[in-house]
Amino acid sequence: MRITDTKSSWGAVTWVLHWVMFVAMVALFALGLWMTGLDYYSPWYTAAPDIHRSAGMLFLFALVFRLVWRVLNPKPSDAELSAMERVTSKVVHWGFYPLLFALLISGYLISTADGKPISVFGWFDVPATLTGAGQESTSGTIHMVLAWAAMGLVAVHALAAIKHHVWDKSHILTRMWSGPFSKSD
Ligand code: HEM
Ligand code: HEM
């Protein structure tokens, strides 16, 4: 099994990160929407945001690692795409990183606005840094808008992948789906 990416396939690290983070992001989105509607008397009133914040911080560490890994590894060839598709796929792929970092940092800023650290599943604390007047509500609005924008970009990205697979009969989706087990190497 290949660990690193090559000129023709995605390795195990990118493959695991891509699909685990996809599931995590959809789960965090659904959890975020659900928990903000919870009643004070719900047994999940404090537990759900604790889980959301903790899992979100792990997502942030994973994203830093993913970005470093991406820069250090070759990118599988996209020669079969048209010039226009190559540009848009680059914009979408690289667009995810700043968008997700901004989403995660806004979440961190909501949660630490009162100066208290975030306890990640009780394992360790992430300290507060910035605190200011109105930080919680401003970051909350930004977080909500960025969460919807990120889901929008995921939808565009996933539809493009499905279009390449069904319409163009390209192996781009199969290559990411089978990752280190793809036969193309
Ligand atoms: C949270 C959701 C998702 C995010 C943030 C995301 C992000 C990315 C990024 C950044 C890349 C470029 C490689 C990298 O930097 O790791 C990529 C590649 C890819 N993604 Fe996603 N993705 C998501 C969900 C999906 C879904 C649902 C599908 C399929 C239906 C999909 C299909 C692909 C494919 C096929 C590639 C490889 C493109 C190529 O070989 O040029 N992704 N994705
Ligand atoms: C992929 C990562 C994340 C996604 C998709 C996500 C998504 C969401 C969504 C959809 C909401 C509901 C927004 C609303 O309707 O008001 C929300 C709320 C919230 N999120 Fe996240 N989130 C992520 C990461 C984080 C992180 C890393 C933190 C903190 C460390 C965080 C902290 C919060 C908090 C405190 C709220 C409640 C805000 C309020 O009460 O207005 N989130 N999140």
Image (tube, grey):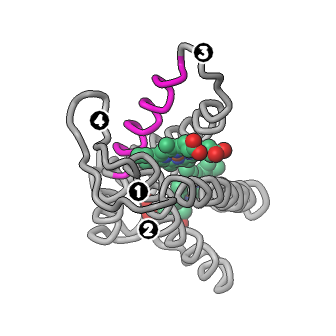
Q: Amino acid at mark 2?
A: Pro
Q: CA distance from mark 4 to mark 3?
A: 23 Å
Q: Comparing marks 4 and 1, which lies closer to the viewer?
A: 4
What is the secondary structure assignment of the residue under circle 1?
A: loop
- What residue is rendered at 45% in x and 55% in y? 104
Q: CA distance from mark 1 to mark 2?
A: 7 Å
Q: Quadrant of ligand 1?
A: bottom right
Determine if the C-beta at disc 1 is less than 8 A from ligand 1.
yes
Q: Nearer the viewer, residue 160 or 31?
A: 31
Q: CA distance from mark 3 to mark 1?
A: 47 Å
Are the residues at dot 2 and dot 3 in contact (C-beta closer than 8 Å)? no
Please provide the residue range marked out in magenta.
44-60
Q: Comparing marks 2 and 4, which lies closer to the viewer?
A: 4
- What residue is rendered at 46% in x and 66% in y? 97
What is the secondary structure assignment of the residue under circle 4?
A: strand
In the image, residue 60 above or below residue 157? above
